[in-house]
Image (tube, rainbow, N blue to C red):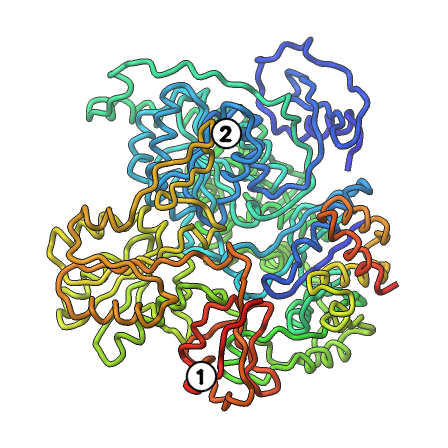
Amino acid sequence: MPVNGVSVFVNLFLSGRLLPSSRVAPQDFVLSRHCFGTGFLFSGGDRYTRKVYYMHEEFLMGNEAIALGALAAGVNLVAGYPGTPSTEVLETVAKRRCEGVYVEWSANEKAALEVAAGAAYSGARTMVTMKQVGLNVASDPLMSLAYIGVKGGMVIMVADDPGPISSQTEQDTRSFAAFSKLPCFDPDGVSDAYSLIGEAFEYSERYGTPVIFRPTTRVCHAYASISVKDESEWKRNNPEGFVRDTSRWVIFPRLSYINHGKIEERNARLSKVFSDSGLNTLHKPEGSRLGIAAGGISYAQVRETLTAISDVKPALFRVTTPFPFPEEKALELLRGLDEVLCVEELDPVIERGLTYVCGKYNLKTKIRGKLTGDIPPAGENSRAVVDAAVTNFLGIERNSKAPEVTDSPPPLPARPPVLCAGCPHRASFYAVKTAMRGRKSVFCGDIGCYTLGNAKPLDMVDTCLCMGAGVNIAQGIWRVEPDTICFAFVGDSTFFASALTGVVNAVYNRADMILVVLDNSTTAMTGHQPHPGTGVRMTPAAGGEHGGKISIEGVLRGIGVDAVETVDPLDQTAAVDCVKRMADMKGVRAIVFRSPCIVLFKPVSAAVIDSEACINCKACIKTIGCPAIVLSDGKVKVDGAQCTGCGLCVKVCPKKAISIISR
Amino acid sequence: MKKNIILCGVGGQGTVLASRLIAAAAMKRGMSVMSAETIGMAQKGGSVFSHLRIGDELYSPMIGLGEADIIIAFEPAEAVRMLPYLREGGTVIVNTDPVMPVSAALGGSGYTGGEMVEYLRRSVPHPVTLECGKICRELGSPKVMNVLLLGAAVGSGVLSLTRDDIADAIRERVKAQYVELNLKALNYTV
């Protein structure tokens, strides 16, 4: 790690990652001073401006680096909706922001993008944060905003999730960028993400267009010790305010036609600019016949593989701007090469880009990657996958460092994620299961912790598609099977984000269904963010004033739901009665199961098993699947460290051998 | 110099803090650090890992198969799960107390943890085994298991860090009232 100003300056210089700009006069260059504690001075800047920055080192998560990079770029407003792996970006902006930076969790991604667009119309630098499937929700304003453009820099931070590790799709936001015609930036690591987000703002503002910034899970959730600017070095941006201009801000077919032409012309220009910018780097040793092209974390994996290979040195092309594709730089790579391997995750974006360039310029270079079966079509590019692909491509013996296994290991216990011990969702699912025993019913699930209700022994999720879909899917199933009682389970945050139109649809079309709102008063799965039902805001106004708290029951009644009842699922008797009552009614009915997320409280009680009374029938284990009930030497035991004393096991024990004691 | 460290266990066992302490101590020594870990849905009772890399010329936060210098395992089956990452002659520090998954209770898979420790003893020259549950009861809190294992890892000499380095990191990052307890855990294996 460089420890003095000069070496860091050189690093930044060589990385070629800063914009050529003449915004700062050369006399701004100041000689380095001494360093004190962690706040020591690094001289940074680019080869043209030589500005000196006070910097310090921090161990940051990729998402934290993105947040600090946006703050350093003078972001004024950040809006988003939680979603793994994007969530920590907005949270870090809220935690580390300076005065005057506004941050909100919006009701959903569409709302976030529109709020940010309005602020960017008014000259503010704005950032929107979401995961890849969130962009589907925000795609309506996104597609139109691409035609209208922005005044202040606007970065749409969309985290992709190869694997997928915690998502329902392996969609590629680089492809979405091409579809929406918006420039896209793809960082290859934590340090790169920090500097690249600043460049994304610069390009956005210079070209008057929103841009997409697309890290992936292994960038978002990786950590690295990196140098970041001190707060005193952050850019301050004072928005001009909204300037009325109907020929600019009002979308009409004629304007879209004119702007479409301009966008295509701009993107062609940007392809050239990106080729020359230093963002897309090319190392091409003299006489090379083979090349590797990669972007994002795959580029880092390729670098790691190549450090262990000394006998072959392929040309190496890093694609940081997959759209507009840096065609001229690609041509520089391809000329004279026999073959190029494209290492990327999700879609074959670089591979298609290079194949296109080969066709256009009539080059004979063979392009390999996902389309030729050299890179797996789906999933993450692990180190092992990249090692194998690169060594195969280079035609060298793979020197596997993994010790040979002669003695195969005993079967490993599977550890699928489960609902936490004491989770109120378990009680809700169990109440519905008990009440509907013997009756024909379908349980439509949704996105959140409660998707885990699908695990055995609960087995209470028959469908799950995307945010809010369960409410409508239940209606569709009922249209085909009118004798089935159709349930839709939805969490409180998801209810406000995406389920409201589904309830409106059910009431309007006189469907017959039971909506179950699992209200644990937080967005639990992504790490307990507030939402409209809690009334707590990410950044309360001066004086601590929080937001408007919206009543779920009030909304349901307002829409015209036939019956609405609220019950605590941990009161199993009342909960089961409520479900039975609702099941015997017709129309659109709603049950709000309200009990707070258990993770937010320190448990005050715990279950104990009377070993005399317990007959070891394991009914408690077989019915509710609570992780706090364990088998120890064949006997049922309560794991005191996990148990929260919710009491659900007490209800299911046929011998009344379980009781609750205070801690 | 390059050190590849894998910490693994089950969600909620405190692998992340242990990883942070090593990172903080290494940074104080002027070394570069990269890491990657399990975050999100998989944390809920699932297998969790932290890849931690210290040293020069680091590009990826991920450790490749056969590249780990040390595996610090909070659970025996998780140590075995991560074993393909260990390099020839690498070190394993392992807590021998098993964590039973819900599926084991349901299906009666017969997992006891002991078979995993046996396997480790057969596969790795000198695994360091610790009965963390018992030792933690002795120390007075189940929460210091991570620092206890960290102490053993430092003792192995593989980390290129001293107990004092980790102790400094503990003093900086752990709440004042728990510092002494953690230092006791750190030095238990001396």
Label 2 crowd bin: few (<14), some (14–19), many (20+), radius 10 Å: many
Label 1 sits on residue: A656
- Indicate the amino acid at tag 1: Lys
Instruction: State the image coordinates of residue A126 (x, y, percent, origin top left).
Output: 44, 28
Question: Residue at position x 21%, y 66% from top?
Answer: A486
SS type, badge 2? helix
Label 2 sits on residue: A200
Instruction: State the image coordinates of residue B11 (x, y, percent, origin top left).
Output: 58, 62
- Work out whether A241 lies above or below A446: above
Q: Earlier in the sequence, mark 2 or mark 1?
A: 2
Quadrant of the rendering where the N terminus of chain A is positioned: top right
Label 1 crowd bin: few (<14), some (14–19), many (20+), radius 10 Å: some
The numbered mark 1 sits on a residue in which chain? A
**In this orientation, which residue lies closer to the viewer: A432 or A64?**
A432
**In this orientation, which residue lies closer to the viewer: B141 or A313?**
B141
Q: Are marks 2 and 1 in contact (CB under 8 Å)?
A: no
Q: Is residue A270 visible?
A: no
Q: Are marks 2 and 1 on the same chain?
A: yes
